[in-house]
């Protein structure tokens, strides 16, 4: 009986320690859009459409729990409308501009010790090793959420990513499939997307059954 109580107590301590040590970061993300991406639109509204798309944001969340990192981007659909005359081309007046952003759900679990990831894509779990990256640490600094951050530029596969990371949070973590760096990434920029942490919350509930939620 004493042994059972000991096991239960140890189990509760183990669970509560995760709950106390789980950190949640909220990011504000925007897609990286170039004028070339808008070439199918009438030339008169491309500039306005570019600004509108750059001002369309989505949210994502990063959970730091020991060596495990959980990245969640919920399915979102947002509509951004701009009313009134935007531009004219001869007899054609472009009066209103409406932009709908569809963002699918993304769930990724990474482990900083094994440098592996598991990605839920189209209801199928895909696992693999994170890309190896050579980080170039620059002298650029900034503060994000009160944390001192350093800029680093990484190249992996055919991609380039620029991040600002901090060592003041005692963990390793990065959004999406961005490889780990010696700290927590609070801002990032790739050729497709950029994001910045806007909120940090401590003592969050432990993540369980991440891909079944």
Image (cartoon, rainbow, N blue to C red):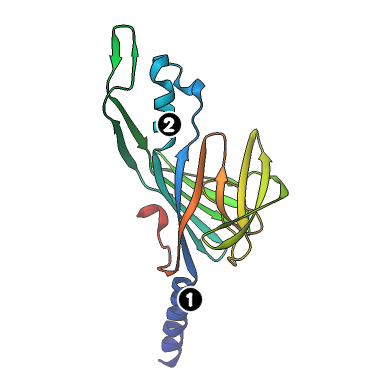
Q: Relative to residue 154, is residue 29 drawn left or right?
A: left
Could you tell me residue 71's position as x and y percent?
A: 47, 52
User: Which residue is nearer to you in this view: 75 or 88?
Assistant: 88
Examine the rendering and report whether any part of residue 122 can be seen.
Answer: yes
The disc at residue 61 is: none
Q: Position of residue 153 (x, y in %)?
A: 67, 44
Residue 41 shows in this picture: no
Near mark 2 (Cα within 10 A), the count class, few <14, some 14-19 or many ≥20, is: few
Rendered view: 190 above or below 137? above
Which residue appears at 40% of the width and 42% of the height?
57
The residue that appears at 68% across and 40% down in the rendered structure is: 155
**Residue 173, relative to residue 80: is it above or below?**
below
Which of discs 1 and 2 lies nearer the camera? The answer is: 2
Image quadrant containing the N terminus: bottom left
- Viewed as shown, does residue 19 lie left or right of 83? right
Q: Give neighbour class at mark 1: few <14, some 14-19, many 20+ (Cα, 10 Å).
A: some
Secondary structure state at the residue bearing disc 1? helix
Q: CA distance from mark 1 to mark 2?
A: 45 Å
Circle 2 residue: 51
The residue lying at 44 percent from left, 28 percent from top is: 50
Q: Position of residue 89 (x, y in %)?
A: 35, 10
Q: Residue at x 46, y 80 (%)?
A: 13
- Reading the image, the residue beneath label 1 is 17
Please identify the quarter of the rendering in which residue 4 is found. Answer: bottom left
């Amino acid at each position: 009986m004493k042994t059972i109580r000991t096991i239960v107590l140890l189990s509760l301590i183990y669970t509560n320690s995760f709950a106390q040590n789980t950190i949640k970061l909220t990011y504000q993300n925007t897609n990286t859009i170039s004028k070339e991406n808008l070439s199918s639109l009438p030339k008169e509204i491309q500039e306005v459409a570019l600004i509108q798309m750059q001002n369309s944001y989505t949210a994502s969340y990063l959970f730091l729990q020991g060596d495990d990192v959980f990245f969640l981007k919920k399915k979102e659909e947002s509509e951004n409308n701009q009313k009134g005359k935007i531009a004219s081309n001869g007899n054609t007046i472009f009066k209103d501009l409406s932009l709908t952003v569809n963002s699918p759900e993304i769930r990724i679990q990474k482990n900083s010790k094994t440098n592996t990831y598991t990605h839920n894509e189209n209801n199928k779990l895909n696992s693999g090793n994170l890309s190896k990256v050579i980080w170039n640490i620059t002298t650029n600094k900034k503060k994000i959420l009160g944390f001192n951050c350093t800029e680093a530029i990484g190249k992996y596969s055919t991609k380039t990513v620029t991040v600002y990371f901090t060592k003041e949070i005692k963990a390793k973590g990065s959004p999406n499939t961005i490889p780990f760096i010696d700290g927590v990434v609070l801002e990032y920029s790739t050729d497709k997307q950029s994001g910045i942490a806007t909120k940090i919350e401590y003592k969050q509930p432990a993540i369980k059954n991440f891909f079944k939620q």
